[in-house]
Image (cartoon, rainbow, N blue to C red):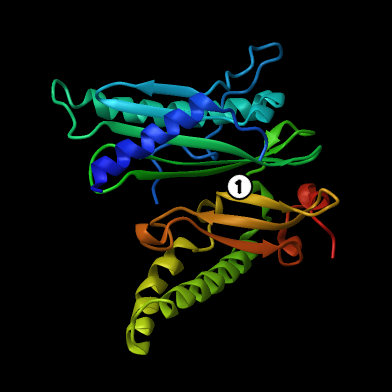
Amino acid sequence: MNRFAQGSYAAAVLLLALAGCKREDAPQAPVAATPETPAAPVEQGAAPADLRDVIENTPSYVIGISYPPAAAKYPGLAQELTQYAEHAKAELLKAVGELGNDKPTAPYELSLAFDMLADTSKVVAVSADGSSYTGGAHGQPLVARFVWLPERQKLLRAEDLIDGDKGWKAISDYAEDKLLEQATVRAQGEDLSPEEQQAQVRNLAKMIDEGTAPDAANFAQFQPVMDASGRISALRFVFAPYQVGPYSDGTQTVDVPAAALLPYVAADYRELFAQP
């Protein structure tokens, strides 16, 4: 099946799934704005964000966006989700508009699914995964994570979470080591000679080194791994395709345990984490 047929089929499946059922609570250069982009403040008494699923199907484009119903309990979070989705949609429609009177070989596509990852009194987390296709060999990946603190009515952002450059250096070193281990395991699973395996890992090492440089921006997408008591036992840092590997390697993740993070977590957020 060629790329265009695959894309149309995938979009059709998504549209049917969205129309036929509604999911309940749940598991580099994205086109849409990432959660670091602040949403406008939610005013008291303002109308809540509309979390209804979006299904649009025209000869030029197909759009499918789904939301978790439970996120509607948190108006500020819901606004963050809809802002992200609306930006992705606007980018797709801009690309469609630039076609003028031309028709794409295959419809442009936006497929975006938000899923609830955690829903506790202190921490709520939502994932956003999908792609935006506006021509070429494959779609542009959309990968984002939103960690909402209900008691504080705000997003937990990477730049606020870790206190100082020393912390980011420790997280960077940890993530780089784990990603290199994962790359080595993948290479060993392929039909390659030992020399070819080593060469493949060496080639990936530069991307991994750059994609995990000790900067909050490189670790902006993360989700909490919660323990039975509702505390964060680890943070799962999420790296979109192209950040630490080629598109074919997909989205990659590294779990950093709370014990390794706590020495560097800002004082205001330490109580969210499981204590050693």
Front-most of residues 108 and 145: 108
User: Would you identify the image quadrant in which residue 10 lies?
Assistant: top left
Q: Residue at x 65, y 20 (%)?
A: 42
Q: Residue at x 52, y 26 (%)?
A: 20
Front-most of residues 226 and 12: 12
Number of marks present in the image shown: 1
- Residue 258 picture location, percent across and down: 74, 61
Q: Residues within 10 Å of mark 1 (few under 14, many from 20)?
A: few
- Residue 2 picture location, percent across and down: 23, 47
Residue of label 1: 27
Name above or below for residue 85 compared with residue 218: above
SS at mark 1 in the image: loop
Q: Is residue 236 left or right of residue 137?
A: right
- Residue 234 picture location, percent across and down: 71, 59
Residue at far left of view: 102
- Residue 235 picture location, percent across and down: 67, 56
Placement of the C terminus among the 4 image quadrants: bottom right
Name above or below for residue 173 compared with residue 71: below
Name above or below for residue 158 compared with residue 35: below
User: Would you identify the image quadrant in which residue 133 lies?
Assistant: top left
Q: Is residue 62 left or right of residue 271?
A: left
Residue at far bottom of view: 194
Name above or below for residue 1 compared with residue 63: below
Kind of residue at badge 1: Pro
Q: Residue at x 70, y 27 (%)?
A: 74
Q: Is residue 151 left or right of residue 139?
A: right
